[in-house]
Image (spheres, rainbow, N blue to C red):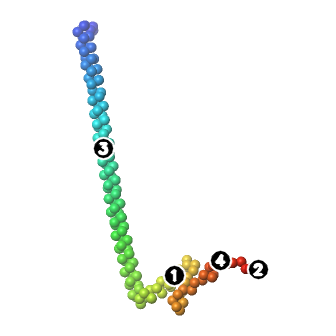
Amino acid sequence: MRLTGTGILGLALLIGLTLSGVLWGCPSYNVYSKEQAGRAALAEAQSSRQIAVLEARAKLESAKMLADAEVVRAEGAARANRILQDSLGGPDGYLRYLQIQAIDNKDASLIYVPTEGGLPLLESSRLAPRRPAAE
Protein backbone atom coordinates (compact mmCIF):
# COMPACT_ATOMS: atom_id res chain seq x y z
CA MET A 1 0.00 0.00 0.00
CA ARG A 2 1.39 3.31 -1.13
CA LEU A 3 0.46 6.70 0.09
CA THR A 4 -0.34 9.25 -2.52
CA GLY A 5 -0.07 13.00 -2.13
CA THR A 6 -3.66 13.37 -1.02
CA GLY A 7 -3.22 10.49 1.46
CA ILE A 8 -0.16 12.14 2.96
CA LEU A 9 -1.97 15.46 3.08
CA GLY A 10 -5.00 13.80 4.75
CA LEU A 11 -2.77 12.01 7.25
CA ALA A 12 -0.93 15.25 8.07
CA LEU A 13 -4.24 17.04 8.43
CA LEU A 14 -5.53 14.27 10.75
CA ILE A 15 -2.35 14.43 12.89
CA GLY A 16 -2.54 18.22 12.98
CA LEU A 17 -6.19 18.18 14.07
CA THR A 18 -5.46 15.57 16.71
CA LEU A 19 -2.49 17.55 18.02
CA SER A 20 -4.45 20.81 18.11
CA GLY A 21 -7.33 19.04 19.91
CA VAL A 22 -4.92 17.69 22.52
CA LEU A 23 -3.29 21.10 22.96
CA TRP A 24 -6.69 22.75 23.30
CA GLY A 25 -8.07 20.02 25.62
CA CYS A 26 -5.19 19.88 28.13
CA PRO A 27 -5.85 23.28 29.74
CA SER A 28 -9.58 22.55 29.81
CA TYR A 29 -8.92 19.19 31.44
CA ASN A 30 -6.64 20.82 34.02
CA VAL A 31 -9.39 23.28 34.91
CA TYR A 32 -11.93 20.46 35.14
CA SER A 33 -9.54 18.39 37.25
CA LYS A 34 -8.91 21.28 39.68
CA GLU A 35 -12.65 21.96 39.93
CA GLN A 36 -13.37 18.33 40.81
CA ALA A 37 -10.56 18.30 43.39
CA GLY A 38 -12.03 21.46 44.96
CA ARG A 39 -15.50 19.90 45.13
CA ALA A 40 -14.04 16.79 46.76
CA ALA A 41 -12.17 18.90 49.35
CA LEU A 42 -15.33 20.90 50.09
CA ALA A 43 -17.38 17.72 50.54
CA GLU A 44 -14.72 16.28 52.87
CA ALA A 45 -14.63 19.50 54.93
CA GLN A 46 -18.43 19.50 55.27
CA SER A 47 -18.41 15.86 56.28
CA SER A 48 -15.69 16.48 58.90
CA ARG A 49 -17.68 19.43 60.27
CA GLN A 50 -20.84 17.32 60.55
CA ILE A 51 -18.91 14.60 62.37
CA ALA A 52 -17.46 17.15 64.82
CA VAL A 53 -20.93 18.60 65.48
CA LEU A 54 -22.41 15.14 66.09
CA GLU A 55 -19.57 14.24 68.49
CA ALA A 56 -20.11 17.49 70.40
CA ARG A 57 -23.84 16.79 70.66
CA ALA A 58 -23.13 13.28 71.95
CA LYS A 59 -20.77 14.67 74.62
CA LEU A 60 -23.38 17.24 75.66
CA GLU A 61 -26.10 14.61 75.99
CA SER A 62 -23.72 12.36 77.93
CA ALA A 63 -22.81 15.16 80.33
CA LYS A 64 -26.49 16.00 80.89
CA MET A 65 -27.32 12.37 81.60
CA LEU A 66 -24.38 11.99 83.99
CA ALA A 67 -25.47 15.16 85.82
CA ASP A 68 -29.04 13.84 86.08
CA ALA A 69 -27.75 10.53 87.42
CA GLU A 70 -25.65 12.35 90.04
CA VAL A 71 -28.68 14.40 91.15
CA VAL A 72 -30.78 11.25 91.49
CA ARG A 73 -27.99 9.57 93.48
CA ALA A 74 -27.63 12.60 95.78
CA GLU A 75 -31.40 12.77 96.36
CA GLY A 76 -31.41 9.07 97.25
CA ALA A 77 -28.48 9.48 99.65
CA ALA A 78 -30.15 12.50 101.28
CA ARG A 79 -33.41 10.57 101.70
CA ALA A 80 -31.54 7.59 103.18
CA ASN A 81 -29.62 9.85 105.58
CA ARG A 82 -32.87 11.53 106.64
CA ILE A 83 -34.52 8.15 107.34
CA LEU A 84 -31.48 6.96 109.30
CA GLN A 85 -31.27 10.21 111.25
CA ASP A 86 -34.96 10.09 112.16
CA SER A 87 -34.71 6.46 113.24
CA LEU A 88 -31.73 7.26 115.50
CA GLY A 89 -33.52 10.07 117.34
CA GLY A 90 -32.38 13.14 115.46
CA PRO A 91 -29.07 14.69 114.45
CA ASP A 92 -27.30 13.88 117.75
CA GLY A 93 -28.09 10.18 117.46
CA TYR A 94 -26.99 10.19 113.85
CA LEU A 95 -23.66 11.82 114.77
CA ARG A 96 -23.12 9.18 117.48
CA TYR A 97 -23.84 6.50 114.89
CA LEU A 98 -21.24 8.02 112.55
CA GLN A 99 -18.76 8.17 115.43
CA ILE A 100 -19.28 4.47 116.17
CA GLN A 101 -18.80 3.70 112.48
CA ALA A 102 -15.53 5.65 112.49
CA ILE A 103 -14.30 3.77 115.56
CA ASP A 104 -15.24 0.49 113.94
CA ASN A 105 -13.16 1.41 110.88
CA LYS A 106 -9.85 -0.43 111.27
CA ASP A 107 -8.04 1.86 108.83
CA ALA A 108 -8.32 4.87 111.13
CA SER A 109 -5.02 5.62 112.82
CA LEU A 110 -6.27 8.43 115.07
CA ILE A 111 -9.76 8.73 116.50
CA TYR A 112 -11.13 11.74 118.38
CA VAL A 113 -13.72 10.89 121.00
CA PRO A 114 -15.82 13.74 122.44
CA THR A 115 -15.48 14.52 126.14
CA GLU A 116 -18.10 15.87 128.56
CA GLY A 117 -17.97 19.30 126.92
CA GLY A 118 -18.55 17.80 123.49
CA LEU A 119 -15.05 18.79 122.36
CA PRO A 120 -12.48 16.22 121.27
CA LEU A 121 -9.30 15.59 123.21
CA LEU A 122 -6.45 16.69 121.04
CA GLU A 123 -3.20 14.83 121.36
CA SER A 124 -1.06 17.58 119.96
CA SER A 125 1.67 16.97 122.51
CA ARG A 126 1.95 13.34 121.39
CA LEU A 127 2.15 14.26 117.72
CA ALA A 128 4.51 17.26 118.11
CA PRO A 129 8.16 16.64 117.17
CA ARG A 130 10.25 15.83 120.25
CA ARG A 131 12.99 18.21 121.29
CA PRO A 132 16.31 16.82 122.45
CA ALA A 133 16.84 17.01 126.22
CA ALA A 134 18.96 19.98 127.31
CA GLU A 135 22.19 19.03 128.99
Q: Earlier in the sequence, mark 1 or mark 3?
A: 3
State the CA–CA distance, disc 1 to disc 4.
Answer: 27 Å
SS assignment at label 2 = loop
Q: Earlier in the sequence, mark 1 or mark 2?
A: 1
Q: Identify the amino acid type marked 3.
A: Leu
Mark 1 to mark 2 CA distance (whole Å): 43 Å
Q: Nearer the viewer, residue 31 or 107?
A: 31
In three-dimensional space, the C-alpha distance between marks 3 and 2, rounded to whole angstroms, equals 87 Å
Name the residue located 25 percent from the left edge and 17 percent from the top edge: 14
Reading the image, the residue beneath label 4 is: 129
Q: Amino acid at mark 1?
A: Ala
The tag earlier along the polypeptide, 3 or 2, is: 3
Q: Are marks 1 and 4 in contact (CB under 8 Å)?
A: no
The residues bearing labels 4 and 3 have C-alpha atoms spaced at a distance of 71 Å
Residue position for label 3 = 42
Q: Is residue 62 above or below residue 116?
A: above
Tell me residue 87's x, y (percent): 40, 88
Q: Across the whole image, how many numbered discs are drawn on residues?
A: 4
Residues under numbered marks 1 and 3 in contact, where contact means CB atoms less than 8 Å apart: no
Give SS at disc 1. Answer: helix
| Between 70 and 116, the one nearer to me in the picture | 116
Please name the residue that numbered disc 1 is placed on: 102
Which residue sits at x=48%, y=83%? 98
Q: Is residue 68 above or below residue 16?
A: below
Percent x, y for residue 40? 30, 41
Left or right of 108 on screen, residue 62: left
